[in-house]
Image (cartoon, rainbow, N blue to C red):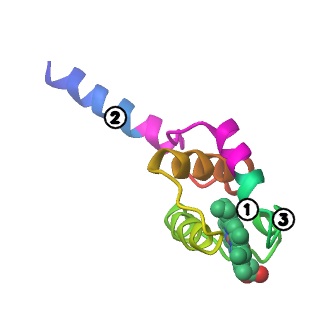
């Protein structure tokens, strides 16, 4: 009994460690392309000297940029965009 509980907990940790972010990256891409290409294109996400080094930093940047884009995304929309950026460009664990 005890053993199987540990197994379950481990499985949970491992699957989240594989970066299964919640959200819908297809919708994230749509929102991104409609709102985020006014100041920079997607090349800033993959340039060699990109400034974002962690998922948390990406969240903060997304907040800041959404603010600059004069767009208030819902929590779900932000999750979708974050997932799109991470799946396609950043690949943070
Ligand atoms: C009002 C202008 C503006 C808009 C609109 C904008 N951004 Fe940005 N964004 C910037 C600036 C300025 C930087 C910093 C670029 C640099 O360092 O050269 C930046 C940088 C970023 C970075 C960091 C790139 C790196 O170095 O790794 C991310 C991620 C990002 N933006 C995401 C977004 C997203 C997502 C949206 C749409 C919600 C968005 N931006 C809309 C101005 C904007």
Part of the protein shown in magenta: 14-31
Q: Are marks 2 and 3 in contact (CB under 8 Å)?
A: no
Residue tagged 2: 10
Circle 3: is it few (<14), some (14-19), or many (20+) Cα within 10 Å? few
User: Is any part of residue 89 visible from this angle?
Assistant: no
The local secondary structure at tag 1 comes to loop
- Residue at image point 24% right, 30% down: 6
Q: Earlier in the sequence, mark 2 or mark 1?
A: 2
Residue at x-position 74% and y-position 48%: 88
In this figure, which residue is indicated by the disc labeled 1? Answer: 36
**Could you tell me which residue is drawn at 62 percent across and 71 percent down?**
65
Q: Do callouts 2 and 1 mark residues in contact (Cβ within 8 Å)?
A: no
Q: Nearer the viewer, mark 2 or mark 3?
A: 3
What's the distance in space between the residues labelled 2 and 1, CA to CA?
A: 38 Å
Q: Secondary structure at mark 2?
A: helix
The question of residue 19 being in magenta is answered with: yes
Picture coordinates of residue 24, whole percent (x, y) = 60, 36
Residue 47's quadrant in the figure? bottom right
- Between the C-alphas of marks 3 and 1, the distance is 8 Å
Numbered label attached to residue 41: 3
Picture residue at 58% right of the left edge, 45% below the top: 80
On screen, residue 29 versus residue 56, left or right, reads right
| Pointer 3 residue Cβ closer than 8 Å to ligand 1 | no
Beta carbon of the mark 1 residue lies under 8 A of ligand 1? yes
Mark 3 or 1, nearer chain start? 1
Q: Position of residue 23 (x, y in %)?
A: 54, 39
Near-viewer residue (7 or 63): 63
Q: Secondary structure at mark 3?
A: loop
Percent x, y for residue 52? 64, 71
């Amino acid at each position: 009994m005890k053993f199987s509980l540990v197994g379950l907990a481990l499985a949970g940790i491992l699957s989240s460690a594989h970066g299964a972010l919640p959200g819908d990256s297809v919708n994230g891409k749509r929102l991104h392309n409609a709102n985020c290409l006014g100041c920079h294109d997607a090349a800033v996400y993959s340039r060699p000297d990109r400034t974002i080094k962690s998922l948390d930093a990406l969240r903060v940047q997304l907040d800041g940029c959404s603010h600059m884009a004069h767009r208030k995304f819902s929590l779900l929309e932000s999750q979708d965009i974050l997932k799109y950026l991470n799946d396609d460009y950043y690949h943070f664990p």
